[in-house]
Amino acid sequence: MKVSVDTSLCIGAGMCTLTAPEIFGQDPEEAVVVLRDPAPPPEQHEAVWSAVQRCPAAVIQATD
């Protein structure tokens, strides 16, 4: 799996950090998503897909 984010469109809702905190963080100053692991291990794939679906701004992209 490869994950990418478009921080320029992030609205800082934080759903990704709540759903997959090992993969996503949030910049403390700008409140936008921070991608911690662009190639997460298999045990994190389900959480990443959930974060993709929950992102209200649709800024997270994931591919197998």
Image (spheres, grey):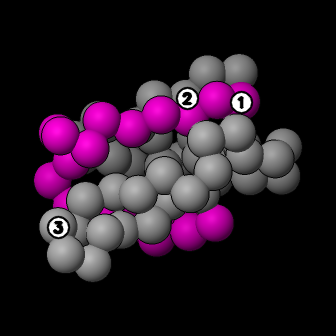
* Res 30 label: 3
Query: Which residue is found at the position 27% from the left and 78% from the top?
Result: 28
**Residue 9 image-quadrant placement:** top left
- Relative to 6, 31 lies left or right: left
Disc number lying in front (1 or 3): 3
Residue annotated with mark 2? 62
Residue annotated with mark 1? 1
Magenta span contains residue 37? no
Q: Which x, y percent locates residue 25?
A: 45, 66
Query: Which residue is found at the position 70% from the left and 39% from the top?
Result: 39
- 3D distance between C-alphas at marks 1 and 3: 27 Å
- Relative to 54, 20 lies left or right: right
Q: What residue type is labelled 3?
A: Glu
Pointers 1 and 3 in contact (C-beta within 8 Å)? no
- Relative to 41, 46 lies left or right: left
Q: Which x, y percent locates residue 59?
A: 31, 36
Up/down of 3 relative to 15, above or below: above
Query: Which residue is found at the position 61% from the left and 22% from the top?
Result: 63
Query: Which residue is found at the position 56% from the left and 35% from the top?
Result: 3
Up/down of 51 relative to 18, above or below: above
**Magenta residues, start to end:** 1-22
